[in-house]
Amino acid sequence: MFRIQLMFRIQWAITLTLLWGMTGHAAAQGNQSALEEGQRVFDKQCGGCHSIQARVQRAGPSLYGVVGRSAGKLPGYEFSTVLREADFVWTPEILDVFLQDPAAMLPGSFMVFWGLGDPQREQVIRYLKSVSAEE
C-alpha cells in the first residue's frame, strides 16, 4: 500500500513539474509574440518618422530607450518648445496618454499623428519598454 502511494505521489510530482514547465514555455512564447506584434505596429505606425536604433534620428527622435528618458531631452534632436520645456519622464502611463492623442497632451508639438487605439498602444508601449530595457 505504501509503495502504491509513493508511486502515485512521484507520478503526480512529475506531472505537475511538466505542466509548470509547459506553462512557463507558453508564457514565454506569448510574451515574444506580443513583442513581435508591438514591433509590427511600431514599424507600421511609428517607424516612418522614428527609429528604434540609438542615435538614429529621422523626422522624429529615436525612440530607443524612450521609457525612462526625460521628455524633450535627446542630444542631437531639435524638439519643439513645448517638449523642450516639458518636465516629465516618459513612463508607460504617460506614453499611454500621449499615444491616445498627442496634440491634446502636448499642443504645439511637432508630432503630427492622430493617435493609436487601445490594443495598439499597449503593444507599442510593451515593445518600447523591451527596447528600453536592453540598454
Image (spheres, rainbow, N blue to C red):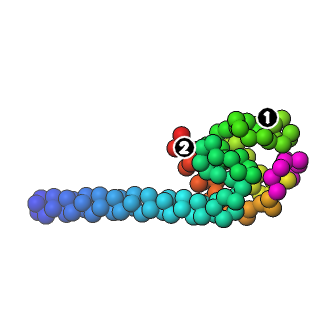
Which quarter of the picture shows residue 37? bottom right
In the rendered image, residue 40, in percent from the top left (x then y), is placed at 60, 64
For the residue labelled by badge 1, is the local secondary structure a helix, a strand or a loop?
Answer: loop
At a point 71% along the width and 46% down the height, the residue shown is: 61
Instruction: Answer few, some or many: residues within 10 Å of disc 1's Cα (few below 14, many 20 plus, some between 14 and 19).
Output: few
In the rendered image, residue 128, in percent from the top left (x then y), is placed at 61, 51
49 relative position to 37: left or right:
right
Q: Nearer the viewer, residue 39 or 57?
A: 57
Residue type at tag 1: Asp
What separation in Å lies between label 1 and label 2 (alpha carbons)?
A: 22 Å
**Residue named by callout 1:** 87
Q: Nearer the viewer, residue 101 or 5?
A: 101
At a point 85% along the width and 53% down the height, the residue shown is: 103
Q: Quadrant of the N terminus?
A: bottom left
In the rendered image, residue 110, in percent from the top left (x then y), is placed at 83, 49
105 relative position to 74: left or right:
right
Residue 133 among those drawn in magenta: no
Q: Quadrant of the C terminus?
A: top right
Instruction: Answer few, some or many: residues within 10 Å of disc 2's Cα (few below 14, many 20 plus, some between 14 and 19).
Output: few
- Mark 1 or mark 2: whose residue is earlier in sequence: 1
Residue 8, can we see it?
yes
Residue 106 among those drawn in magenta: yes
Q: Which mark is residue 53?
A: none
The magenta-colored residue range is 104-112
Above or below 132: residue 3: below
In the rendered image, residue 104, in percent from the top left (x then y), is placed at 86, 53
Q: Residue farthest to the right? A: 108
For the residue labelled by badge 2, is the local secondary structure a helix, a strand or a loop?
Answer: helix
Q: Which mark is residue 133?
A: 2
Residue type at tag 2: Ala
